[in-house]
Structure formats: structure tokens, C-alpha cells
Image: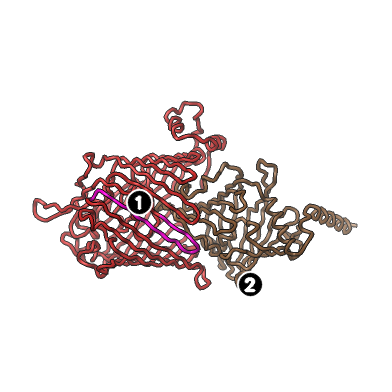
Amino acid sequence: MTISRHALLGTALALSAVAAMPAARAGTAEDRGLAIAEEMARRDAGWGDSTVAVTMILGNREGETSTRALRIRSLEVVDADRGDKSLIVFDRPRDVGGTALLSHTHIHDADDQWLYLPALKRVKRVSSKNKSGPFVGSEFAFEDLLAHEVVKYGYKWLRDESCGEGARLRCFVVERYPKYEESGYTRHVVWIDVEEYRPLRIDYFDRKGARLKTMTLTDYRAYAPENAKTYWRAHLWDMENHQTGKTTRLAFGAYDFRTGLNDRAFTSSRLTRVR
Amino acid sequence: MRVNLQAPVSATDWRGRRSAPWRYALCMALPLLQACSTTPTGEWNLSGEIAAEMRYFAHTPRFAGQDDNIEFSPSGFVQPEIVYEWNDGDDRITLKPYFRWDADDDNRTHGDLREANWLHIGADWDLVVGIDRVFWGVTEARHLVDIINQVDQVEDIDEEDRLGQPMINLRLQRDIGTFSFFVLPGFRKRTFPDASARLRGALAIDDDDPSYDSGADERHVDLAGRWAHSFGNWDLGLAHFHGTSREPRLLPRAEPGGGVILRPHYDQIDQTSLDAQFTHDAWLLKLEALTRSGHGDRFAAAVAGFEYTFFQVMETDADIGLLGEYLYDGREDAPTAPPTIFDDDVFVGTRLTLNDTQDTALLLGLVVDVNNQSTMKFVELERRLGDDWTFELEARLFNDVDDNDALNNFRDDDFVTLRSTRHF
């Protein structure tokens, strides 16, 4: 009796999931992968702007840790050719306190990046080619932090399977191929829950095809800024490097949405005024 | 961590309003106007650094009057920064005093207000009133067009340390770029090493008794304007400066007791400058150029160069950057202009960054005079220790220096600096 009730519940959940996203059913594995990515993007569209404080905890194989603190301000750009804008301001370690990195992402062209060095009060345009190197000595590359514009990747749906903590959720498992040259990866494998289209886990494969890193995204919280949509944000991003044993945790504070940030807050000339 | 005591309501009020600069000034002047009322609570932040330094000079000094016993020379500095922010960060008062103590150079023992200003950020404009530091430029070997702040020459000979400059700086952000206007009351004299100190040159400089072109002396109010814009792969800046030259001419003066000292003279100049950077792939192409009148005949100067970075070399996390710049200065056409070591020189350098947890970085470089091969070599190594300490090693070596090159002033002053800094 108990068993059949669970089975029934499971079927009902699966049915409702399928009904909610017809896009994920039809076509080739590539079509299904792309449809899932597009649905993810559609559900996350319209957030406007956000600010969040992040603590970064770096750990090595010996269990030693060091900590960084930074703040991320982001601006959604609703334009087919231009990606979002972001501003990362470092608070710790203290010797780099006040250093800021401004990024304008582009869909088809290379991104624009400026670095602000507070000791000299100097703004320096830097090469955006280095997407795959370690970000401030962590296990995250800059490309791991960026929002994933749909057209920057190719896709392939692999399978659906149980996922998440205690395997309580259902996930699409989708392969994603970076189309931009600067990527350090040949592919990602992404677990996306079928209910809310949230990425729960990403495996990164290096240029030789070997699994390099795994990121696990947990502590999802729902935000509902003014427009009645719900935006999910993971507050713990745990990256493990399988080849070095090093780890990095990003612990996000509460997000503030719609704080009134606009284009002018994301210009290179404003960098000297950033704190 | 920073604690924000600001009530968010008033902040959105201010941010949403596209207030004109004059309107804000009125509100500041008449704080009782109800429409201008803001929440008085804000946010305090104290940070800064304190450092201990040891300089080692490899040779005995060359010139008469310099202390023969200075081989190891200890020094230290403290630079706290106190910031008070309100209006959700749109208003900010910054106080950044600096004090250095030096065991051997009385002039290097000095204090300065690097910053003491009020900043207001409007919707598409911002305003700074008070003492501030402003950086212009793109090149590495020489900061040719960077003219707002006077060089704090006793700190180092690389002209990167600057004295705080009193100013009113209004900036307007427009679609065609950012326009900055500067009113600069109060001239800052360049600092020079003491008569008995190292790195002072052949003749001692009496920096207490300068002379000026302007009848207003150091009270001349200088003016400057700049347009800067980023578009596509380009970052451009065009600027004009009108006022007291930051570089003094050094005029010899016979002393009553015999001997000669140098007395700084500050001309009134007009300088128009361009700085440009083109960024593509791993390339940065850079140009700084200026034309200046006021030291006699008008002359031009330029620095042009590149930076190319190999990222993640040999499949490690390390980056290696290559830098090259050509430096030209036409002031030999204006014989009365202040001398420069960068008249016809080439800079080559390499920068290694390990991208490790400690942010280890190494810079090696040399600047060679094309005509007489006078060479300055430098090494800069930096690494963080723990969370709050950084450790730096800097060396400067002068080789094959021609008697007529401006570098001759430093030819026996090869030195190594070790610095340990606690950040708080």
C-alpha cells in the first residue's frame, strides 16, 4: 500500500513536470538540450539588477583555508547582442581592498574588462582573454562566475535522473559546449532540476577531456522582486578540483534586487568612485 | 565587515532623482530645506597600512656632502584611511593622511594628506571638493600625461607616489564620454631628498625656497579639463592643463659660503595631452602624447608601447606578460625645460604572476637610452603572507651611465628595498 502510494505520487510529479515544460520532450537530444537552456534563460529573465556580498573560502589538500570577501553588482542587459554587466569589488584580503573589476559581456565579441587599482587610483583596461585562469587564486575561473548566455554554448540532453540532496529531485542532465575560444573547457555536464530549472551541479571537463572540477550549488532561495516572478539563487557554490584536491566555497549573502543601479554605475569612468 | 546603518528609503529618493549639480549645491548650502533633508546616519570605515622598510645602497655615494655612512637605511610609514559614507554611498568623506619616517633623510621624513575630500555621486555627474589623487594615462615606464598631482619624489624615483592636490572636480557622464573639470587652488611643491641623502643628484636642492613664473606664487589657481571615453576596443582621453608646472627647472645659485645649490623654479605651462589604448585579444597597445609650452619653446613628448600576456603558460596557473615601450621627449629643443631621463629611451619588461593564493608577482625591466646606452634596471617582487601582510622586494640598478644623461644623478645609488606591510 505504502509502495503504491509513493509510486502514484512519483508518477503525478513526473506528469506535472512534463506538462510544465513541453519544450523538453520533443526532437533530437541537441534540440532538447537547447530547449532546456532556453527555458532556464526565460525563467531567469527580468531580474533587472542585483547586489550581493560574497565570502570566498579557499581550501587546499592539507585542510588550510584562506578567506576573501567581495561584493558583486550585476545589471541585466536586455539586448540581443550585449550580455550583462557586472562589477566585482574586493574587500579582503585587505591589501587588495577597494580593487574592482568591471565587465561588459558581449554575445558575439570578446568581453570588455577594466580593473581599478585604488593605490594609484588607476583604471586599466585589461585583456578579457583570460577566462579560464584562476580567479583571485581560487578554484573558480572567471568563466565559472559569469551568467550563461544561451548562444555562447552548444547543447545536448543526455538523460533524466534523480539528483540533489538525498536524490529527492529529478534532473535533466545536459551537456554544454562552450563556443567561445577562450574557454578552458571542452564541455560541462549540468544537472538541472525539472521543477524550477535550477542548476544543481556542474562537472567541468578540461581541454584534454578529463573531468577537472565539480561545482555543487545548494541553499537555493527564492526571490520575488516587484514583477511577480520568482528568481532562484543558490547561496552556496562549492567547487572541487579533482586533479589538485583544492576546494573553493562561495557563500553568498542575501541578494538585493532592483536597487536602482543603471548603465552609468557600470562605466569605466565611474570605477574611480566605486567603494 | 561593513555595517550599513543607512535607511534605504532616503537612498532611493536620491538615486532616483536626476538632480542637477547646482540644485545639489543649493541643498548643501541650505540644509533646512525640507526637500533636501537626508537621514543623518551613515557608515564609518577605517582601513589602512603600516610598513617597515630597509634600503640597502650598494656603493658609497658619489657627490660631495652626501653621508658616506648610509649603507643600510631603515624607514617606515603609516597610511590610515577613514571613510564616512551616507546617502547609501552617494555621499562620502575620505580622510587619508600619510606619514613617513626615515632614519637618514630628513626630507623623506614627511607627512601629507593624500586625500581629504567630500565626494557626491549624482545620477550622471559627480563632484569632489577637497584634496584628492587623480590618475591619467595608460603606459607603464613613464606616466607622461599624469599631471594633476605633484610627484612625491622622496618616496621613490619612479614618480608613482604623489602628493594630495586640493581641487574642485566636477565630472559629467554623457553618452559621448565623461567630461571632467578641475579647479586646482594651492600648488604643491615637489619634494626632494636632503643634502646629505642618497638619490639626490650632483647638487643639493633647496626645496624650501622655490621661485615661480606666476606673481601669485604657489597660490596660482590652476585649471584642467579632460574628456575620456571607452568604446569598442578603444579607451581614449584628451586633456588640457593650464597652470603651474609640476616639474621644476633647477636653477644653480651660488651660496654665500661658496659652493652651488639648486633652486626649483616653477614655470607657468599649457599642456595638451592624449592617452589611448587599443585592447584586443591578449594585446594592449598604448600611446601617451603631449605638447607643452611655457618652459621656453614648445615641445612634444610621447610614450608608445604594448603589453602582451601569455595566460596559463605551460598549463600552469601562471601568466607571463611582455612589455615594450618607446619613450621620446623633445624638450632638448627647449633647453630651459626641466631635464628628463626619458628623452630617447626604450623600455622592455616582463611580468610574471603566479595567480596563487598569495598573489605572487614579479616584474623585471630595464630602460635603455638609445643614444648613450645609459641603463636603469629594476626588479619588483611582491607576495602576500597570511591574510594581512605583504612582502615586497624592489631593486634599482644603474649601469653604463653617460656623464651627460640625467640618470647620472643616480649612477652610484644602486639600491634594494625590502618592505613588509601590515594591512588593516
- Please report the residue visible at 83 percent of the width from the left and 57 percent of the height from the top: A10
- Label 1 sits on a secondary structure element that is strand
Q: Is residue B320 left or right of residue B399?
A: right
Q: Which residue is mark 2?
A: A209
Q: Residue furthest left?
A: B257
- Quadrant of the frame with the N terminus of chain A: bottom right
In the rendered image, residue A46, in percent from the top left (x then y), is placed at: 65, 46
Q: Residues within 10 Å of mark 1 (few under 14, many from 20)?
A: many
Q: Amino acid at mark 1?
A: Ser
Q: Is residue B7 visible?
A: no
Q: Position of residue B262 (x, y in %)?
A: 17, 53
Label 2: how many Cα within 10 Å (few below 14, some 14–19, many 20+)? few
Q: Does the magenta portion include A248?
A: no
Q: Chain B in the picture: what colour?
A: red
| Type of amino acid at the residue the image marks with label 2 | Gly
Tell me, for residue B273, which label it has, or none: 1
> Magenta span covers which residues?
B276-295
User: Which quadrant of the structure image shows residue A31?
Assistant: bottom right
**In this view of the protein, which residue sits in the foreground, B388 or B322?**
B322
Q: Answer left or right for B406 relative to B20.
A: left
Chain identity of mark 2: A
Majority SS type along the magenta span: strand
Picture colour for chain A: brown
In this rendering, does residue A210 appear at all? yes
Q: Foreground residue, B124 or B259? A: B124
Left or right for B412, reference B381: left
Which residue is at the far right? A1
Is residue B284 located in the magenta-colored stretch of the structure?
A: yes
Chain letter behind tag 1: B
Q: Which mark is residue A45?
A: none
